Amino acid sequence: MKVHFIGIGGIGLSALARFLNNDGHEISGSDMKSSPITNELQKEGIAVSCPQQASNIKDDFDLVIYSAAVTDENPELIQSRVKQIRTLSRKEALPIILGDKKNYCVAGAHGKSTTTAILASILQSSALIGAISKEFGSNFKYVNDLVAFEADESDASFLLSNPYCAIVTNAEPEHMEYYHYDYDKFYGSYESFIGLATKRVLNGEDKDIQKLKIEEATYLYPSIDIKNLSYTLKDKEPCTRFELKDLGTFEVWGFGYHIAVDASLAILAALNELDIESIRTNLLKYKGIKKRFDVVQANDKFVVIDDYAHHPTEIEVTMKSVELYDNLTNLNNRIVLWQPHKYSRTSDNLEGFKKCFRRCDELVILPIWTIPGEQKIDIDFEKEFAVYNPIFADRISSTNGRIDLIKDEKIIKSYDKGIFLGVGAGDITYQLRH
């Protein structure tokens, strides 16, 4: 088939494009502007057009797939419909891509990218992840019909992922605007997703998973099953060691209790495919994922960490990892660079955001990263976060061994010592990289 992707530069849609490209289909795509992802896709032989315009839609396209961010006013989507080309949202396209595969689908409000990437490393399988695995430098890998897939609950698309094994890290309510703030509908979607799978691996101590009506599953009880955690640095990279049930000791890239939990869920799922010694060995191949406690600079007095955390629960967990890192390096100065993500998320979780930075010494707040068409909500950051005495900057500039805060195109503060944690799901990841 000739398949065109509208919004191909997105982390999720690009993975699907790569998967179909590897399956032998003729792939093209477009986005609003070029990016590192679109540049990589072009190197892989996928034709990418920027910006998006009606002329990109050709008469011989068999299918057009568009991202969740694409609206009905998009010129390419309009032209596709005018030409009566079959159009599917990313969600609707999943059965085409995953319908004939053996899928290990990982869902949850937090930790699903990490767990999926760990599982892909253990299984040495194909992978579709909403992040870049450092092991293979991509959000996609094609090996065989065994697939580690990051399943998305934000639009209930995980219901179309054809799971052989459903792994759920947690079921904390998020993206409630999609579910019209109907909690029964939200939890019901998780129950349906889990019910689709032949095998189920769940975090039995998650208070939201405990609310679900599940008939049969393999449960992880972290406070009982995970023992003797320890943390070390290897070439300034974080490493967690732990014992799991009666399966022995495991070592995984990353810091924190949550990393041990994510790895344990992946291990228990992988037991359906591999013996325990193969799992233990393959786990060492996991090298983290970009934008998840991603150490982008490190010397003896200056460390910069990039993390995708954009919800209070995620930031709280990441701050604990920063504390562990600080305890091992004695840098003793933790500066958080926060780029709030979307007005709705920031407003809905404001009380959580006000509490989650309490382990930092300084808080820098950047402008909200929003999406086209989002309704603006007035939030008085200066008042709400007064306890932190935050610094407000327009952007940051990162060079080797130094970070500058920029406001009105002037440097208002510079740093060359400390641990810097950048959090957010917007373009802060590029600002942190010099």
Image (cartoon, helix red, strand yellow):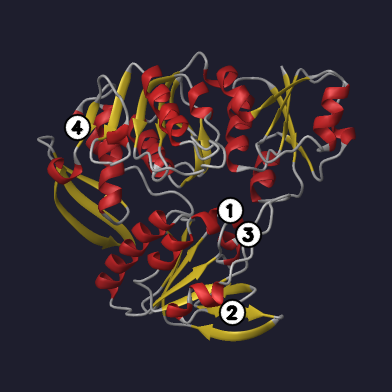
Depth check: 392 or 50 in front? 392
Tell which circle, 3 or 1, labels the residue nearer the N-terminal end.
Answer: 1
Depth check: 110 or 131 in front? 110
- In x, y percent, where is residue 117? 41, 39
**Quadrant of residue 112 in the image?**
top left
Mark 4 highlights which residue?
Answer: 277
Mark 2 highlights which residue?
Answer: 405
In the image, what residue type sits under mark 3? Answer: Trp
Marks 3, 2: nearer the viewer: 3
Tell which circle, 3 or 2, labels the residue nearer the N-terminal end.
Answer: 3
Tell which circle, 4 or 3, labels the residue nearer the N-terminal end.
Answer: 4
Marks 4, 3: nearer the viewer: 3
Q: CA distance from mark 3 to mark 2?
A: 17 Å
Residue at x 22%, y 37% (from the top left corner): 280
* Image-based side of 77 in relation to 152, left or right: right
Crowding at mark 3 (Cα within 10 Å: few <14, some 14-19, many 20+): some
Depth check: 401 or 9 in front? 9
Marks 4, 1: nearer the viewer: 1
Crowding at mark 4 (Cα within 10 Å: few <14, some 14-19, many 20+): few
Tell which circle, 1 or 2, labels the residue nearer the N-terminal end.
Answer: 1
Crowding at mark 2 (Cα within 10 Å: few <14, some 14-19, many 20+): many
Vertical order, 24 against 173 (above or below): above
Tell which circle, 4 or 2, labels the residue nearer the N-terminal end.
Answer: 4
Mark 1 highlights which residue?
Answer: 344
